[in-house]
Image (spheres, rainbow, N blue to C red):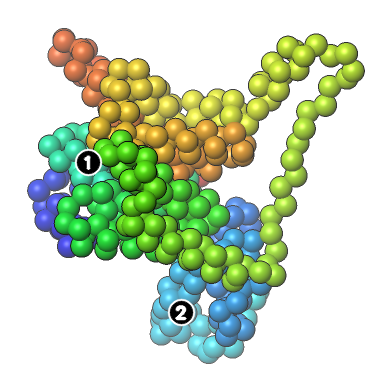
Amino acid sequence: MIKNLFTLLSKHYLFLFILATAACLRLLNPTFAQPILYVNGDEPPNYQGALYILANRSLIVRTAIYPPLGSYLQIPFLLWTFFCALIIGGAHTIQELRLLVITQPGYFLFVPRIISGVLGVATIYILYRTVLALSPKNKTLALIASSFLTFSFNHGQISHLGRPWASAMFFFGLTLWFTIKSLGGAKNQQWYSAILAGICASISYGIHQGGIFAFILFLLVRFVEIASTANFATAFQNKITWLGGFIGGMGIIGIRILEIGNPTAQWFPYFKQFPPQYPLAQQIWELFLDSNLLYNIKQLFILEPGIFIFSLIGLIGAHPWKKPYTALFAYTVFAFLAIGASFKQPRYILPALIPASLFAAQGVLYCYKRITTQLFKIGFIGISFILVSFNLTAWNILFN
């Protein structure tokens, strides 16, 4: 996939423009509010974990609420930055460098922010290639899907800051790519792709707990695809699926072992209480109004109106459950319902939002093909672009 990048860009100027736009929206002003450490509460854990590792010369992190691979990822880039600081005179000795980190702890926060931005852009490239792999003759679909992710508010926000989400979603994207590749081609390629999918899934989890959905994606997509082609027994007995699942599962278990003794984020369940004799129908209605799922649906309608609206249109008109999208559609629906019903955090739905960009692109094409007047087509494109791009663009202007 990587070796074809420059060939791809040389032939697809529009996609190059999309990637450039994505980079601007994700890498703009990475030194914002430095050297303040707690601009965002999700940035310090892995950043300080990396500093903790360097200070104690141990790979065991005892300061982060997230899995340790996010801290490991930052270490070589932080070391290179420290080296450059010594060379250009930002600090003259190791002792001065340590004093700088102690007195201004957020001084090097631009490092994880740049990592997040670059990997966020790379995720868009992976999505483009994945859609092309599913629909080789429909480059327009791939361009629209990558445009949706480019202007996705949640993906842009987590890629702009030094949160672990961007790195985790990059390896989620790689898991998606290798999972699709494992479903076709030569047998050796299927084995190879399944192994890499399992490794990427465990790395995704090793950066953020939400990466567990990369592991679920691999298992569910392969099972649904094989079951829809053959039968359930064949899907359960498939050795390639078992191998990839074993590698991913063992990697996740290894990450869990590394996390033993680390602080954890406390989640306190909330249960709405009702007075005695309160009507049952009213209880059910109020529980629905207060549910995580409804909250996330409303948030997505506000934050991701393009993906949300066009995904619904695609669901009604484009029939996204048909091949070759059957398995990916099943995973997307499952992930959206599972995550949406569990957390009141719209960005947690990213493991469903990334593949949903494909189905939103189907919705755009479905609408466009049914508009007969050229003037209306131009108006549709303009209104759709504003709908998709406004939130993230406005956030960048206000944030920076």
Residue 38 placement: quadrant: bottom right
Where 214 sits versus 232, above or below?
A: below
Indicate the amino acid at tag 1. Answer: Leu
Q: Residue sitting at 19 percent across and 18 percent down?
A: 369
Image quarter (top left, top right, bottom left or bottom right) of the N terminus = bottom left
Q: Position of residue 248 (x, y in %)?
A: 44, 61
Task: Identify which residue, 362 or 46, lies in the foreground.
Answer: 362
Q: Is residue 153 left or right of residue 175?
A: right
Q: Position of residue 237 (x, y in %)?
A: 36, 51
Q: CA distance from mark 2 to mark 1?
A: 40 Å
Q: Is residue 191 left or right of residue 86?
A: left
Q: Position of residue 316 (x, y in %)?
A: 35, 17
Which residue in the structure is indicated by mark 1?
134
Which residue in the structure is indicated by mark 2?
79
Indicate the amino acid at tag 2. Answer: Leu
In the rendered structure, find residue 304 and report the number of the disc placed on it: none
SS label for mark 2:
helix
Q: Residue sitting at 66 percent across and 21 percent down?
A: 288
Q: Is residue 177 left or right of residue 100?
A: left
Task: Identify which residue, 56 or 318, lies in the foreground.
Answer: 318
Mark 1 Cα shell of 10 Å, populated few (<14), some (14-19), many (≥20): some
Q: How many marks?
A: 2
Q: Residue sitting at 14 percent across and 45 percent down?
A: 13
Q: Position of residue 269 (x, y in %)?
A: 74, 40
